[in-house]
Structure formats: structure tokens, C-alpha cells
Image: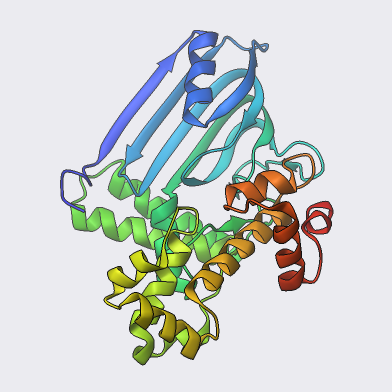
Amino acid sequence: MDDAARALVRTETSGTELDDARALYQAGYNGSDFRAELSDLDFSYRYAVAGGPDMSLRSSMYLGTIRGTVQPENEYIVSWLLGGRGAVDLGADESVLVRGLPAMFPTGKRYAFDFADYRQNLVHFDAAFLERVAADHEGVLPGPLHFDHRAVPNPEALRRWNACIDEAARLIIRGEPTPLQQAEIDRRTAIVLLDSFAHEAVLMPPVLLAPRNARLRQAVERMHASAHLPLAPAEVAEEVGLTPRGLQQAFARQLGVTPTEYLRAVRLDRVQAELTQLGPRDTTVAQVAARWGFTHAGRFSRSYAARFGEYPRNTLLR
């Protein structure tokens, strides 16, 4: 990334108008049905951002009550209360935030929240950036990470996280980091996040780690990274320097499947991950299947059952 793209950004918004605050937070967190009301305190709000495109440090102050539903897009977010109260993912998976204790925003679904008279710090990570770091650091394939927002890091993990955030704040908020310093603190903070907060990812198949399978590994990584997009095997073959026939032979020889069968399996894995994370109140099997490109309900259900030993509806209900 060039220096201009990585330039440090500092912004601050504040005011005393209830409608302005509601619009700010609803737009910033892909929200809907926000309800903002006055509390016993004089209403005001403040929202500040400092950082670059990969990671930013944020602070929020809101004197009043605010409720609604959100689903942040293309971001992973961790936050901790400094004052007031807050609860996320209202209902069966509800998590009441504890002052000073960092917690991940729920991932992979839309959820309801309820906050009042709060001060809060947050760290936003660009989704593609954090997924790339996870692939390098943990040996997983690039793709969505699923964090358990109710899990509490152990004391040693919290100590490392707090120390890393203190260092990042000194550099980003109170300093003038160079592009290289910014990149280093972004990556270091991402690694501490991954080491501290419980999450799941798609593991890299061991056979693909051998150097002699470099082109096949590139093809598989491309499929995992772009499984949500229209992707033809010929396009993958060209990108990794193989002919379509050569790609077919590599998959058959090393993995025992065709590229198309492998990509379909990747998409089935993504469907299972979403059905496992969500529930009947959040989505339907048909919606998730459509999102991952499956068009025939019967064939999809049979393929899913053959791969996972149960029908997709049973996964969702569990």
C-alpha cells in the first residue's frame, strides 16, 4: 500500500442533537430501527477516529439511550465500556458488557443491542486485512473468521491486549507514525487480537503446504478467498500459470476431485459455518444457500447431508 493510502486519519464528530447522533451511528454500523431517547443526563455525543485503512482506534461517548439492530460490514470490531451500560445480541446469545473488559462484536449476523449513558473505546479491523493476517499467523485459508462474542480472554491474554492497545494509542493518537510504523502496529495488534479472542477459521489442508504443490496451493487459496464471487476454473488456472487441463490434473492427482467439486465443497463449508453461527430467528436455509450460489434446493440438501452427515435445517436448528 502506498503512503497516501496508508495516511493517518483523525476525525471527530460531536453534538447535542438526538437525530444527528442516531443517523451517525446507524450509518456507521449498517444499522436499522434505531430508537434514541433522552435519559436523566443532558444529551450529548462524541465520536472520534484515529488510524489507517487496516486498523483504527475509536472512542464514543453517548449520553442517552439507544437501541436497534446492526451488522457491521467488512469489519471486525472489539470494544470495551469505560462507563454506562450496554448489551449486545439480545435474546438467547445475549452478552452484557462488563466495564473495562474487551469483547468482540458478534460476527456473521445481524443482532440487536441496547446501550445507555456510555463511554466506549473500540478497535476496528478491516476484514480482508485481519483475514490475511490470520492466514499468515495461524495457517488458515483466507476467509471469514467467526468470533465468540461471549468468550472472555484469560488474564494473561488481557494483559497482552491492554499493553498492545496502549502502545498503539501512543503511536497513533499521540504520535506521527511513519507508514512502516503504522503497518507494524496494525499487524502486531491484529496478531494479539487473534491470540486473545476465541474464533474459528478454515484450516489449511496439510497436503497443500508442500512446496511442490505451490501452484495448487495458490489455486486453492484463490478459491477460498473468492468463494463468494462467480469464479470459473479456467480463470483460476490462468492466474496460477496452468492450463485448464493442467489444473484439472493437479486437483485429481493431489486431492482426488475436480476444481469445480472442490469449489462447491468450499461453499458448502461456508454454508455450514453460517448455519452453525446463526439460528432460525436470524436466517433461513434457503437464504444462506442462495448467498453461496446454490440454486436447486433438493440437490443442495443432498450434497450438504453427504458432506456433513445431517441436513442443513438440522444444523440451523441446533
Residue drawn where x is 40% and y is 66% of the image: 222
- Quadrant of image for the N terminus: bottom left
The front one of 72 and 78 is 72
Based on the displayed image, in which of its 4 quarters is residue 65 positioned? top right
The image shows a total of numbered marks equal to 0
The residue at the point 62 percent across, 12 percent down is 41
Which quarter of the rendering shows the C terminus?
bottom right
One can see residue 142 in this view: no
Residue 51 location (% of width, % of height)? 32, 42
Q: How is the image coloured?
A: rainbow
| Residue 290: % across, % down | 62, 47
Q: Would residue 192 be found to the left or right of residue 282 on screen?
A: left
Q: Is residue 260 above or below residue 313?
A: below
Image side of residue 53 versus residue 276, left or right: left
Residue 18 screen position, x and y as percent: 54, 10
Q: Residue furthest left?
A: 3
Asked if residue 175 lies left or right of residue 30, the reply is left
Residue 225 appears in the figure = yes
Q: Answer with the quarter of the image where residue 66 lies.
A: top right
In this rendering, the answer to whether 39 lies above or below 234 is above
Residue 106 lies, with reference to residue 260, above or below; the image says: above
The percent coordinates of residue 300 (x first, y second) are: 70, 59
Rendered residue at 24%/41% (across/down) = 8
* Residue nearest the observer in this picture, 267 or 246: 246
Residue 130 vs residue 206, the one in the foreground:
206
Foreground: 244 or 108?
A: 244
